[in-house]
Amino acid sequence: MGAAEIISFEEVRASKQWSTLRQQLHKRFDQWLDTLEQPWHEPPSTLTEVTATVWDLRQQLTGGITETIVAHVHRGAHDCTQVTCPRCDGRLRARERVCRTVETMGGPVQLERPYVSCRSCRLGRYPFDEALGGGAGCTQLDRHKAAAQLVTEVPSDTAQALVRELTGVPFGSERRHTVTNHMAQELTVLDVVPPPEAIQRRVAAVAAGRWRRPVVVLGIDGAYVPTRPDSAREHRPGPRGQRARRALWRGQWRDAKGFRCSLLDGDRLVPLLSWHQVHNERERGEALQEVQDAGVIPEGHVRLCVVADGAEWIGKHVQALFPQARQVLDYSHCAHYIHTSAKAH
């Protein structure tokens, strides 16, 4: 008689859970096939037509699969009937279920979860949402991350078009601006510039085979830009249904100051670093000080040239931080000053 194989209870439970999940996923896929069958009165014949049809409906499939897996993994929080209040340790019974739809990169996910509240502490909770660890808003963190990565690489409007075109996920301009502002709120200049070692490698590549040190051009400037106040996202006061959804607001022109550092390589410029923010003169000087203290610009291996518009605040910071730099007045302002002087004469 052969030896009997021992199977642990955990293995049995895991296999049963996976079997149940497979059945639920098969059911969800059958529902998607029913949706796919409706527009197919005549099946598409070319590869382009097939991929276009599947592409248009893929969000329903991936969103449904995500919804099924989430409900299965967090079954305990999804079906809970009572929880403990974190403040008074009282037992709270679950009330009515509240539906919520969140937008993810995998598609819309519908969540139906119980709501519990403590009358004595006046504290309401959604245990299912806490177990998921998602964001508070409709748009979830994965979409915020995708939008933030694009916004930091390409212009804002281009990023919005690329998100929709490449992923099929719409991302409005208001949400895009909000994500960008939140992302940049705590950043400093040293968080966005390349490390000194990377800049030194670029300088060494340009300097190879030359007997003179390469030129690094530091451009500093400021400009007024239109901005929208935070109050633009607030609701107007008054009875619901008799007021506009958004508050009345007026834009404000603010001074955006920044600098850009490039390596001169013949007739082309090799970008090294860039930093532009709505800052005042003091904050811009502090950013330049951080760059100088961190040794981002290898002053001993380059010839530094600062191009600016002749503003007094720029010359003050350059003289204090980069006294050996050659200061050059940019062409447009130089022409303006010469014209003004000639007209006066």
Image (cartoon, grey):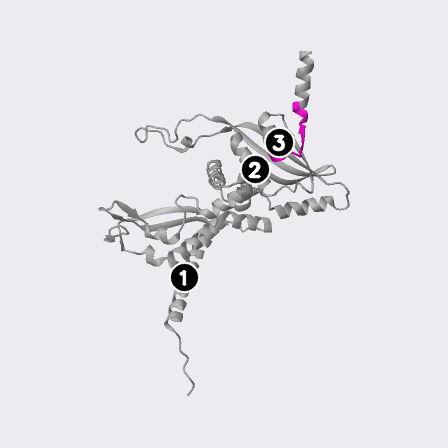
Compared with 310, 107 (above or below) is below
Between residue 278 and residue 176, name the one nearer to us.
278
- Real-space Cα separation, disc 3 to disc 2, in angstroms: 12 Å
The residue at which mark 1 appears reads as 21
- Real-space Cα separation, disc 2 to disc 1, in angstroms: 58 Å
Q: Which residue is drawn at 62% across and 31% down?
A: 319
Q: Which residue lies furthest to the left in this view?
A: 120
Q: Position of residue 241 (x, y in %)?
A: 32, 30
Asked whether residue 65 appears in the rendered view, the answer is: yes
Q: Is mark 3 on a helix, strand or loop?
A: helix
Neighbour class for label 1 at 10 Å: few (<14), some, many (≥20)? some
Q: Which of marks 1 and 3 is nearer the N terminus?
A: 1
Q: Which residue lies furthest to the bottom in this view?
A: 1
Which quadrant holds the N terminus? bottom left
- Real-space Cα separation, disc 1 to disc 3, in angstroms: 68 Å
Between residue 142 and residue 226, name the one nearer to us.
226
Per the rendering, the mark at residue 319 is 3
Q: Is mark 1 on a helix, strand or loop?
A: helix
Neighbour class for label 2 at 10 Å: few (<14), some, many (≥20)? some
Q: Which residue is drawn at 57% across and 48% down?
A: 49
The residue at which mark 2 appears reads as 289
Tell me where the magenta segment starts and ends, as one range: 320-333
Compared with 89, 1 (above or below) is below
Q: Which of marks 2 and 1 is in front?
A: 2
